[in-house]
Image: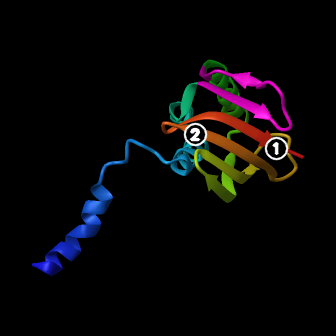
Amino acid sequence: MNRFLLLLLPVLLVAAPTPKVLTPAMAVERQLEALNAHDLEGVLALLAEDAEASDLPAGAPTVKGKAVLRDRYAALLKGNPDLHVSAEAQIVSGGFVVQRERLKGLAGAKGPVEVVMVYQVKASRIVRMWALRE
Protein backbone atom coordinates (compact mmCIF):
# COMPACT_ATOMS: atom_id res chain seq x y z
CA MET A 1 0.00 0.00 0.00
CA ASN A 2 2.87 2.43 0.70
CA ARG A 3 4.14 1.92 -2.86
CA PHE A 4 0.74 2.89 -4.20
CA LEU A 5 0.82 6.13 -2.22
CA LEU A 6 4.31 6.91 -3.50
CA LEU A 7 3.11 6.42 -7.08
CA LEU A 8 0.00 8.51 -6.48
CA LEU A 9 1.77 11.45 -4.78
CA PRO A 10 3.17 13.05 -7.99
CA VAL A 11 -0.28 12.89 -9.58
CA LEU A 12 -1.85 14.58 -6.56
CA LEU A 13 0.79 17.30 -6.55
CA VAL A 14 0.25 18.08 -10.23
CA ALA A 15 -3.52 18.15 -9.74
CA ALA A 16 -3.29 20.41 -6.68
CA PRO A 17 -5.07 23.74 -7.18
CA THR A 18 -3.06 26.90 -7.71
CA PRO A 19 -2.70 28.78 -4.45
CA LYS A 20 -5.07 31.74 -4.12
CA VAL A 21 -2.50 33.76 -2.22
CA LEU A 22 0.63 34.37 -4.25
CA THR A 23 3.94 35.23 -2.68
CA PRO A 24 5.50 38.40 -4.08
CA ALA A 25 7.96 36.32 -6.13
CA MET A 26 5.12 34.17 -7.51
CA ALA A 27 3.09 37.23 -8.52
CA VAL A 28 6.05 38.73 -10.40
CA GLU A 29 6.86 35.38 -12.03
CA ARG A 30 3.28 34.95 -13.21
CA GLN A 31 3.27 38.49 -14.56
CA LEU A 32 6.36 37.68 -16.68
CA GLU A 33 4.77 34.41 -17.84
CA ALA A 34 1.61 36.26 -18.91
CA LEU A 35 3.69 38.94 -20.63
CA ASN A 36 5.65 36.30 -22.55
CA ALA A 37 2.40 34.60 -23.54
CA HIS A 38 1.14 38.00 -24.77
CA ASP A 39 -1.79 37.53 -22.39
CA LEU A 40 -2.85 41.12 -21.63
CA GLU A 41 -5.66 40.08 -19.29
CA GLY A 42 -3.30 37.74 -17.45
CA VAL A 43 -0.84 40.60 -16.90
CA LEU A 44 -3.60 42.94 -15.73
CA ALA A 45 -5.02 40.32 -13.34
CA LEU A 46 -1.80 40.57 -11.35
CA LEU A 47 -1.94 44.36 -11.01
CA ALA A 48 -3.74 46.28 -8.29
CA GLU A 49 -6.42 48.69 -9.53
CA ASP A 50 -4.29 51.66 -8.45
CA ALA A 51 -0.96 50.18 -9.62
CA GLU A 52 1.80 52.67 -10.40
CA ALA A 53 4.86 52.51 -12.64
CA SER A 54 7.85 54.84 -12.53
CA ASP A 55 11.36 55.13 -13.87
CA LEU A 56 14.23 55.47 -11.41
CA PRO A 57 15.40 57.88 -10.29
CA ALA A 58 11.91 59.29 -10.12
CA GLY A 59 9.57 61.57 -8.32
CA ALA A 60 5.91 61.15 -9.19
CA PRO A 61 4.72 57.99 -10.96
CA THR A 62 4.90 58.17 -14.75
CA VAL A 63 1.92 55.83 -15.08
CA LYS A 64 -0.86 55.52 -12.53
CA GLY A 65 -3.87 53.22 -12.58
CA LYS A 66 -4.73 49.91 -14.16
CA ALA A 67 -6.61 51.52 -17.06
CA VAL A 68 -3.51 53.46 -18.18
CA LEU A 69 -1.32 50.39 -17.65
CA ARG A 70 -3.75 48.39 -19.82
CA ASP A 71 -3.13 50.81 -22.68
CA ARG A 72 0.65 50.71 -22.15
CA TYR A 73 0.84 46.92 -22.01
CA ALA A 74 -1.51 46.55 -25.01
CA ALA A 75 0.73 48.85 -27.07
CA LEU A 76 3.86 47.03 -25.89
CA LEU A 77 2.47 43.63 -26.87
CA LYS A 78 1.04 44.83 -30.19
CA GLY A 79 4.22 46.63 -31.23
CA ASN A 80 6.54 43.81 -30.16
CA PRO A 81 5.10 40.45 -31.29
CA ASP A 82 8.42 38.68 -30.55
CA LEU A 83 8.78 40.12 -27.05
CA HIS A 84 10.21 37.77 -24.45
CA VAL A 85 11.23 38.82 -20.94
CA SER A 86 13.41 36.70 -18.68
CA ALA A 87 14.47 37.22 -15.09
CA GLU A 88 18.26 36.95 -14.87
CA ALA A 89 18.61 37.51 -11.11
CA GLN A 90 16.21 38.11 -8.26
CA ILE A 91 16.20 39.35 -4.67
CA VAL A 92 13.07 39.14 -2.53
CA SER A 93 12.67 41.16 0.66
CA GLY A 94 9.24 41.13 2.25
CA GLY A 95 6.78 42.52 -0.29
CA PHE A 96 9.53 43.73 -2.64
CA VAL A 97 10.98 41.83 -5.58
CA VAL A 98 14.05 43.23 -7.33
CA GLN A 99 15.12 41.59 -10.54
CA ARG A 100 17.42 42.10 -13.45
CA GLU A 101 15.38 41.40 -16.56
CA ARG A 102 16.42 40.82 -20.15
CA LEU A 103 13.99 41.88 -22.88
CA LYS A 104 14.36 40.34 -26.32
CA GLY A 105 12.34 41.10 -29.42
CA LEU A 106 11.84 44.82 -28.79
CA ALA A 107 11.14 46.66 -32.04
CA GLY A 108 14.00 49.01 -32.89
CA ALA A 109 16.44 47.49 -30.39
CA LYS A 110 19.68 46.13 -31.82
CA GLY A 111 19.78 43.34 -29.28
CA PRO A 112 18.54 42.37 -25.84
CA VAL A 113 17.80 45.20 -23.43
CA GLU A 114 18.53 44.84 -19.73
CA VAL A 115 16.57 46.62 -17.05
CA VAL A 116 16.44 46.39 -13.26
CA MET A 117 12.87 46.22 -12.03
CA VAL A 118 11.61 46.73 -8.49
CA TYR A 119 8.12 45.42 -7.78
CA GLN A 120 6.08 46.03 -4.64
CA VAL A 121 3.46 43.35 -4.07
CA LYS A 122 0.56 43.47 -1.60
CA ALA A 123 -2.24 40.90 -1.29
CA SER A 124 -0.93 38.96 -4.33
CA ARG A 125 -1.13 42.05 -6.60
CA ILE A 126 1.62 44.26 -7.95
CA VAL A 127 1.00 47.75 -6.60
CA ARG A 128 4.16 49.57 -7.72
CA MET A 129 6.85 49.02 -10.32
CA TRP A 130 10.07 50.97 -10.77
CA ALA A 131 12.38 50.56 -13.77
CA LEU A 132 16.07 51.42 -13.77
CA ARG A 133 17.46 51.62 -17.32
CA GLU A 134 20.76 52.75 -18.74
Percent coordinates x, y for residue 79 in the rendering:
73, 33
Residue 82 shows in this picture: no
Q: Which mark is residue 109?
A: none
Above/below status of 19 relative to 75: below
Q: Amino acid at mark 2?
A: Val
Percent coordinates x, y for residue 56 in the rendering:
83, 38
Q: Is residue 1 left or right of residue 10?
A: left
Residue 51 shows in this picture: yes
Q: Amino acid at mark 1?
A: Leu
> 91 and 15: which one is in front?
91
Q: Which residue is mark 1?
A: 132
Q: Is residue 117 left or right of residue 49?
A: right
Q: Which residue is mark 2?
A: 121
Q: Secondary structure at mark 1?
A: strand
User: What residue is shown at x 57% (from left), y 42% (from top)?
Assistant: 31
User: What residue is shown at x 48% (from left), y 36% (from top)?
Assistant: 123
Percent coordinates x, y for residue 16 in the rendering:
29, 54
Counting residues from the start of the chain, the first of labels 2 and 1 encountered is: 2
Q: Is residue 80 left or right of residue 33?
A: right
> 4 and 26: which one is in front?
26
Residue range (magenta): 50-66
Q: CA distance from mark 2 to mark 1?
A: 18 Å
**Is 62 one of the magenta-colored residues?**
yes
Q: Residues within 10 Å of mark 1 (few under 14, many from 20)?
A: some
Please tell me in which quadrant of the rendered image residue 67 appears: top right
